[in-house]
Image (spheres, grey):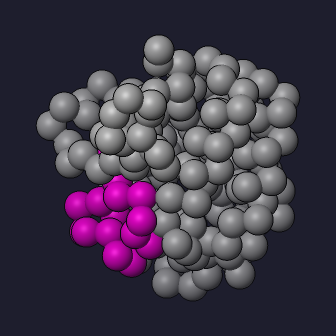
């Protein structure tokens, strides 16, 4: 992806000591959440760990037409029959990995990675633009590198293209 291309940002907010990334216009968007694995001591309620305008558990094909447009709109010059790469099983695996690493290393800051996905859906390289912590970078780069992707489609044919993974990590007390 070139400097001039728009970068896809998964609008995700992870609360309760997890990651957070805010989208300015998220108020009017659909809202999907991931909850923590176990409730905090003293309550049975599981807090939301992530909030997104995209469902975490859906593949690209399972997204609604509007959700697919949201994903595609972040890629410059994408034709009608083009599709970006997307994790085969949805975003949940990546966000689950991030939740686990952030529970162990509660840091604040932007995590900005990009997976270079080949025409077969395999990650051939992970680019690192920014990260709040070296260990978080290593774990999330490995998570991206081992994720199987639906390859991008260029004029209906599988092609290589990058998949950006951008979140802001915060800590909520």
Q: Nearer the viewer, residue 117 or 165?
A: 165
With respect to residue 100, does 14 lie above or below? above
Q: What residue do we see at 78% from left, 36% from top?
A: 137
65 drawn magenta: yes
**Residue 48 place in picture, x, y as percent:** 36, 39
- Can you see residue 95? yes
In the displayed orientation, state which residue is furthest to the top: 173
Q: Looking at the rendering, which quadrant does residue 103 occupy? A: top right
Q: What residue do we see at 70% from left, 39% from top?
A: 101
Magenta span covers which residues?
53-68
**42 displayed left or right of 93:** left
- Can you see residue 160? no
Q: What residue do we see at 67% from left, 72% from top?
A: 148
Give the dominant element type of the magenta stretch: helix, strand or loop.
loop
**Residue 57 place in picture, x, y as percent:** 42, 65
**Residue 30 place in picture, x, y as percent:** 20, 48
In the displayed orientation, state which residue is furthest to the bottom: 157
Q: Which of 10 and 39 is in front in this view?
A: 39
17 drawn magenta: no
């Amino acid at each position: 992806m070139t400097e001039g291309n728009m970068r896809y940002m998964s609008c995700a907010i992870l609360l309760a000591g997890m990651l957070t990334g805010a989208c300015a216009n998220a108020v009017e968007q659909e809202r999907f959440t991931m909850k923590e694995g176990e409730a905090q001591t003293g309550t049975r309620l599981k807090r939301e760990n992530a909030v997104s305008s995209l469902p975490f558990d859906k593949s690209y094909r399972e997204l609604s037409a509007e959700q697919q447009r949201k994903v595609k709109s972040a890629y410059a010059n994408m034709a009608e029959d083009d599709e970006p790469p997307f994790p085969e099983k949805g975003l949940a695996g990546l966000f689950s990995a991030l939740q686990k690493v952030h529970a162990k290393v509660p840091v604040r800051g932007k995590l900005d990675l990009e997976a270079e996905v080949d025409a077969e859906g395999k990650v051939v390289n992970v680019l690192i633009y920014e990260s709040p912590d070296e260990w978080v970078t290593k774990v999330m780069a490995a998570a991206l590198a081992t994720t199987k992707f639906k390859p991008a489609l260029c004029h209906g044919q599988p092609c290589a293209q990058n998949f950006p993974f951008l979140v802001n990590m915060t800590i909520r007390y």
